[in-house]
Image (tube, rainbow, N blue to C red):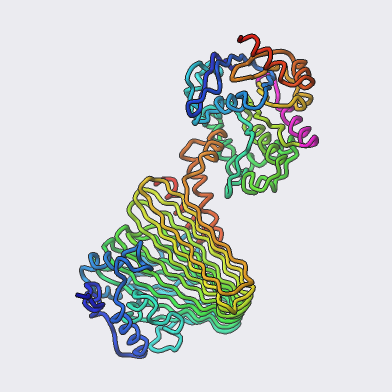
Amino acid sequence: MLSIKNLHASIDGNEILRGINLEVKAGEVHAIMGPNGSGKSTLASVLAGREEYEITEGEVVFQDKDLLDMAPEDRAREGVFLAFQYPVEIPGVSTTNFLRTAVNQVREYRGLEPLDAVKFLALMKEKMKLVEIDQKLLSRSLNEGFSGGEKKRNEIFQMAMLEPTLSILDETDSGLDIDALRIVSNGVNQLKSDKTATIVVTHYQRLLDYIVPDYVHVLYKGRIVKSGSKELALELEEKGYDWIKEEVESASV
Amino acid sequence: MMTTATTSKLFTQVQSLFQASGGFASIRQQAVESLENQGFPVAKAEEYKFTNLSKKLENGLTNASFAEPFSIDQATVDAHIFADFDGDVLVFTNGSWNKELSKVTQDYSVEVISEDGLLGAISKPGKDAFADLNTAAFQEAIKISVAKGKVIEKPVLLIHFNQANEGQIVMPRLLVQVDEIAQVTLLEYAVCLDEEVYFSNALTEVKVAAGSYVKFFRLQNQSSKAILMDTMETDIHRDAVFTSVKISLAADMIRNNLTLNLLDSGCEGNMYGLYLLNGKTHVDNHTNVDHTMPHAVSNELYKGILTDSSRGVFNGKIFVRQDAQKTNAFQQNNNILLSENAIINTKPQLEIWADDVKCSHGCTTGQLDEEALFYLQARGLDKTQAKGMLLYAFAGEVLEFISDEPFKAHITNLVMERLGTQF
């Protein structure tokens, strides 16, 4: 589904990603872990199409198409979804309003009829249950005055509405208490299928107790330096990242 | 050699329009004297330093005469009433009231006045040259009166039909007197049937008596040749509430002077404005709120979106006098500039003489929020849609204050159309 080859990206002349290679197949959950500043969020942003990053080398193929060649909105329409680490507050735009436009844009792109107000509301009601989000919240200005947990639940709600093929969760667990974490993970798990894939970017192993990965990758200094099964995450939790750093440093000497 | 006021070009152009006789002789004389002494604002005049209206008029008033009242048919009037409007209509042609085509079905009165002690007592001569010009020269003064205790349920729409030869002038003069514990909502806009350069110099005085509730929602959407000067001054008495919403969308140059006098305790004055400017449109909003007594509230929010080579000016004065303890006064001006050549000059001006007050002011000027734009794009909205949505959300905060739903819908449509096509 997703094939990343030798991806290099920089911002303001600083190289952040220095040759990422990653293959993600339908039905898989990949966790990307790593210390702060290792490039995890940059990878998520680059995949979603954030413009401030410059791709200097490499390629990303998503369902046989060149992902890097697409505008952010076309990536979304093709089925890439980024759950933001810091969801943006937009005064004056309600989740309901913008999401109806978004859902219909995506549907149009995929050759589907637009949803009328009644059908849209029915779909909303169904998806709201997934993340236990209140309709009142969705008619308020997007994320404005939302708690951290509400913002993240809103991200997963939007994901449910847009039915992506590839979901990228960028530190969706940060700032969540255990109850919110359960709700969010539960939502993500229910949306998983053998046709979709998920990339979970996180600093902590805790989230992976709830969203169980098939593969765990450790990102350090812009490269994937270690890959393994979910046990690798447990090892990282126990021993921290220092041993990985040491491995990398000694190997490069 | 000093140039005296009376030898300035603009003064000479408009001098023949002054009217000395009739019931308003006294205030007219005061206005003329003030103009003779002070003249029209020169380029460096503090109040007009970003808006050289005098120069604009010197060049534009090629035929500085009044555009006279004209006849108009019902179909033309109907064609300019927005969808779903439910209320009364007052029709004016070139500043003159057309009684036949107006529809007064509720319990208030409209009349042409030839004398009235209130006219010129709210907006006193000597404060502003263009207000003085109106007082010195207006052809017809119209008064809307709402008697004590009357609640006018449906809105009253004032439509000014203007038809002027190139370089002509209209000077609407309106007095609104709302007596104690009465209530009314007024809507107003002008329709220019020609697209010539013309000058509208309107002056509206409003008295909001104790305990009454008045809303005034106005739209400025004219041809790119129209030069508009609009002065409104309102006296707000004890426990009364006055709300002004002004939406400026199109003209060549617009200067709005809005003054609220909070004359007693417990009263509230609200001033909201939105300007969406493109091309070379120049819009200047000068507001002035004067807190004279304790426990009064004023709220102010003006927002602007500017593109092309347009220019916006905002100047908000708040005076809190020594007796006006426990005043709450809030002011905010926010702007989005969408092009390199658009300019905004914004200036809050607070003078506070009382020591136990809550006053705040703030202004922001920026571009569209790139992070918000990316967020919407990442959800599948194309860039144009995402921009339109963000700009509409920005503007919508002001539109929310228009409590007449059909008028709000009408203006919302105009705003969305503009955001969709122009930005």
Q: Where B247 falls versus B6 (above or below)?
A: above
* Residue B124: quadrant of the picture: bottom left
Q: Is residue A110 visible?
A: no
Q: Give the quadrant of the N terminus of chain B.
A: bottom left
Q: Residue A143 appears at what percent x and percent y? A: 64, 44
At 48% from the left and 63% from the top, the residue drawn is B348
Count of residue discs = 0
Q: Residue furthest front?
A: A253
Q: Residue A174 appears at what percent x and percent y? A: 71, 33
Residue B155 relative to residue A33: left or right? left
Q: Nearer the viewer, residue A75 or A243?
A: A243
Q: Is residue A97 visible?
A: yes
* Residue A77: quadrant of the picture: top right
Q: Residue A180 appears at what percent x and percent y? A: 77, 36
Most common secondary structure along the magenta stretch: helix
At 60% from the left and 24% from the top, the residue drawn is A39
Residue B26 relative to residue B13: left or right? right
Q: Residue furthest left?
A: B1
Q: Give the quadrant of the C terminus of chain B.
A: top left
At 45% from the left and 61% from the top, the residue drawn is B347
Residue B54 relative to residue B269: left or right? left
Q: Residue B380 appears at what percent x and percent y? A: 54, 33
At 41% from the left and 80% from the top, the residue drawn is B142
Q: Nearer the viewer, residue A139 or B34?
A: B34
Q: Where B154 falls versus A16 (above or below)?
A: below
The magenta span reads A177-196
Asked whether residue A126 is drawn in magenta, I would say no
Q: Nearer the viewer, residue B326 or B268?
A: B326
